[in-house]
Image (cartoon, rainbow, N blue to C red):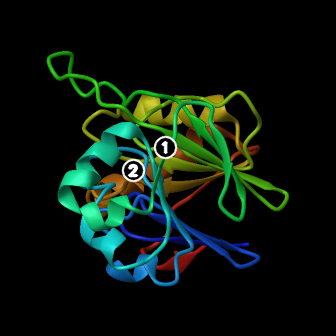
Amino acid sequence: MRITKFGHACVRIEHEGAVVVLDPGVFTDAEAVDGATTVLITHEHPDHYHPDHLRACDAPVFTIDAVAARLREDAPDVAERLSVVAPDDRFDVGVPVRAVGELHAVIHDDYPRFHNSGYLLTVGATTVFHPGDALTVPDTSVDLLLAPASAPWLKLSEAVDFVRAVGAPRSLAIHDRVYSEVGLGMVEQHMGNLLGDSQEFVRLADGADL
C-alpha cells in the first residue's frame, strides 16, 4: 500500500492496481488524479470538490446525492461516471469501502448543515478512515485516521478528542490549509502532548508518502 498526502484534504491510496483518490479540491494539484481508478468525494465544498480535477481523469466518481446534483450542473460529462452512496452503503473500488456518517460538522448555528460522507476503506490488512468535514466516529477499529487539523468548524480540543475517540494507532493530518505553518506546528505539538504513546500523529508535506 502507498498513501500520498496531497493538498489540503486530498489523499491518494494505491494498492494492488487500485488508485483511489479522495477529495481532490481547489487546494489540490491536478497530478493527484493522474491514473486514478476511482475518486471519492465527501461533500460539495470547493476545498473537497473541484470539477476540473474530475474532468482531468476518466475514473468513476462515488459521492453523496448533494455532490451529484452539483456535478450534474457543473460537469454533466462527468455525471455519466457517477455512483451515489448513502450512509452505511458498502461498495468495492478495488478495495472495499463503507460510507460513514451523513452531516458536515457545525460551522455556526445560523448556517444550514451540509451533507457529508466519510469513507472507511479496507486496504489489505489496513483500515483507513477519511471523515471529510465531520467528527463522526466509525463503529469499528481504524488503523489509520486521516485527521482534520484545522477548519472554521474545528477547535484544537475537538481535533484531539476526535483522534482519541477513533483510537487509531496512527493519524495523518489533513485539512491543513486553514492554519499557517506556525499554527500547524502548534497542533502537532499538542497532539504529541495529549495523545500519549499509543497514538502517533503525523504531518506530511504535499506530495509526500506515508
Image coordinates for residue 5, horizontal then vertical, percent: 50, 69
Q: Depth check: 80 or 121 in front? A: 80
In contact (CB < 8 Å): disc 1 and disc 2: yes
Query: Helix or strand or loop: what does disc 2 sit on?
Result: helix
Q: Is residue 114 above or below residue 122?
A: above
Residue bearing mark 2: 186
Task: Please name the amino acid that badge 2 sits on.
Answer: Met
Query: Helix or strand or loop: what does disc 1 sit on?
Result: helix
Residue drawn 26% across the image and 59% down it: 180
**What residue occupies the far top of the structure in this picture?**
109
Q: Is 71 positioned to the left or the right of 90 in the image?
A: left
Q: Quadrant of the N terminus?
A: bottom right
Residue bearing mark 1: 190
Q: Is residue 154 visible?
A: yes
Residue drawn 39% across the image and 50% down it: 186
Image coordinates for residue 103, horizontal then vertical, percent: 40, 27
